[in-house]
Amino acid sequence: MKFESMFQPIQIGPMTVKNRFVVPPMGNNFANTDGTMSDQSVAYYEARAKGGFGLIVCESTVVHKGAKGGPRKPCLYDDSTIESFRRVADACHAAGAKISMQLQNAGPDGNAKNAGAPIKAASAITSKCGSDIPEPVSTEQVYELVKGYGAAARRAMEAGFDAVEIHMAHGYLVSSFISPRTNKRVDEFGGYFENRMRFPRLIVEEVKKATEGRLAVLARINSSDEMPGGLDVHDSAVVAAYLEQCGIDGLHVSRAVHLRDEFMWAPTVTHAGFSAEQVEQIKRAVSIPVITVGRYTEPQFADLMVKEGKADMVAFGRQSLADPELPNKAAKDDMEALNPCIACLQGCVPNMYKGEPLCCLTNPFLGHESQPLKKAETPKKVLVAGGGVGGMCAAFICAERGHQVSLYEQSDVLGGNMRLAAYPPGKGDISNMVRSYIARCERDGVDIHMNTEVTTDLIKAEKPDAVIIASGSRTLILPIAGIDDPAIVHGSDCLDGKRPIGRKVLVVGGGMVGCETAEFLAEKLHDVTVIEFRDTVGADIIHEHRVYLMESFEKYGVKEITGAKVCQFYPDGVAYETADGKRHETRGYDTVVLSMGYRSHDTLSEAVKEIIPETYVCGDAIRARRALDATKEAYEVAIQI
């Protein structure tokens, strides 16, 4: 498929961008603690510029001293950091991309400890439970804050940036003034619409004045706050039209405040371009370019959005983390080579919140752009035992370093437990990752052997120089009476269609594995009950995923038994104990499904080390954990060999 619309140039104010692919601002924690951009910051942005993105927007950059929300936030509230930003701009320009800087004061979503000062907002309303109470900005302070935006924009211009983007979304400082949900002021910055828009209008005017028309000036706005009493899309369309009258050159339309994070970084179950209809309404309200964002992973729908005039540019956020080469691959119509974002939320968002450098389950190279993969000084013969994502990841990285790699998989299909993780509702994108890893192994010349168990005899015969054990994990079977009854169905066999499942089902285990298995069955109208040792089901599931899973449980009437320690399995149910020591039974089920998680499976490494001293173990073969750990460890092992 050709993506002609996405490769058309576009004019935004004084800036001409070569195509419609955008890297949006994402907090990555690559900056130095003094607010300067690091070598890794430069390499990260440069990689995406070289990957073909036309416009790159640097992550939220702090414009006011005392408003730093995290320890590794880039800052532009004085001249000392300008030179470091110039390095980023120069690197992106050399690769043919335009570069924009997002100007931000986190306001009520800031952190007083990191900032070293009280956080500010339109009114003294906390962003969420446990956050700092913001101080209302005094009328006089509002005008001082306006000047800070202008000064930061001037510094961006001096650093060689092509544009600035004023952050007016997500409940941050400017957003807190715009939305009646958070603006309870009674001075000239509160009350009716134009008063609430006075602060953003003054910022736009100050920024335009400071940059003398030499930079494109954009604004990032919410299409909707997704909260009662906040802005809805009709309000936001009016905000957009008003900002155009104020002189804004373009709009970047995002969605929601942090209380509704599932709209800000949508989980796997959310379809690509899920905010498209809201963006379309805003596009109709203005004549300036509009950037749409919201879980775009492939260019097909993005191209259609631009072709139909529903948006002018498309921002690929987490997808640009997973594969900085997206535009180049789209230009070659080589989409099978794309390394996909599966919206797992395992390495990006959690690390952003923790103040740690971002990492990515599907792209273990993220965060290492300043340390490019090096060819091995001495190519070796490498044998990989296990064809899950950890094994495949180790295999293709070793191959790309110049090693001769053979991968052995015991079954007739690659992907391991990650392949099965694609079966629950809304998780189909995980199959994209598995397929992309298979394709990459094939392209890199990995010699793949299926239906072959790795034994010490095989290793003696093959005589590899190095061995990587990535044998993964198996169903966790605890020493509970009756658990080995042949009538008990393992969750993996349930998902893989290897065992028939009756109508009334008891799923034993209410962690992520059990809950997703229960949802898989409930969607097919099985009568499902989940029994869990902890006091709540899904306690180990990432919040944004759990929001939608719990909605499914309610929709399909999945029943829950919690605080229950299973002590006996029967073909039609279980016996369990509660915290008070009492024994209970739940019986009468057609099928009992065992989904209590996984345990590591490594019966080989100790023996292999006696034969091949250079033997490594990675992923679930060490300990059953997240897929992120498997690919991260695969990378770490592969670069050592």
Image (cartoon, grey):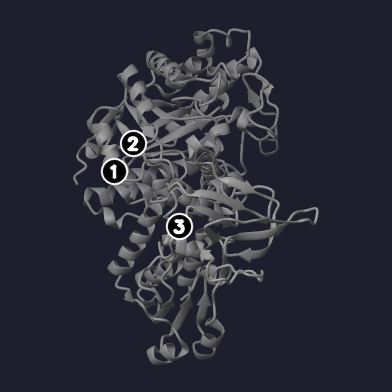
- Neighbour tally class for label 3: few under 14, some 14-19, many 20 plus, Cα within 10 Å: many
Does residue 164 sit above or below 530 in this rendering? above
Mark nearer the N terminus (3 vs 1)? 1
Q: Secondary structure at mark 2?
A: strand
Give the residue at mark 2: 314
**Which residue is painted at 58% across and 7% down in the image?**
188
Tag 2: residue type?
Val
Q: Secondary structure at mark 1?
A: helix
From the viewer's side, name the closer residue of 316 and 243.
316
Tag 1: residue type?
Pro
Quarter-of-image position of residue 145: top right
Q: Position of residue 579 (x, y in %)?
A: 77, 53
Does residue 105 sit above or below 337 in this rendering? above
Does residue 184 sit above or below 344 in this rendering? above
From the viewer's side, name the closer residue of 420 and 49.
420
In contact (CB < 8 Å): disc 1 and disc 2: yes
Tag 3: residue type?
Ala
Name the side, left or right, on which 473 lies relative to 291. right
Residue sitting at the far right = 580
In contact (CB < 8 Å): disc 3 and disc 1: no
Residue sitting at the far front = 588
Give the residue at mark 3: 421
CA separation in Å, label 3 and label 1? 25 Å
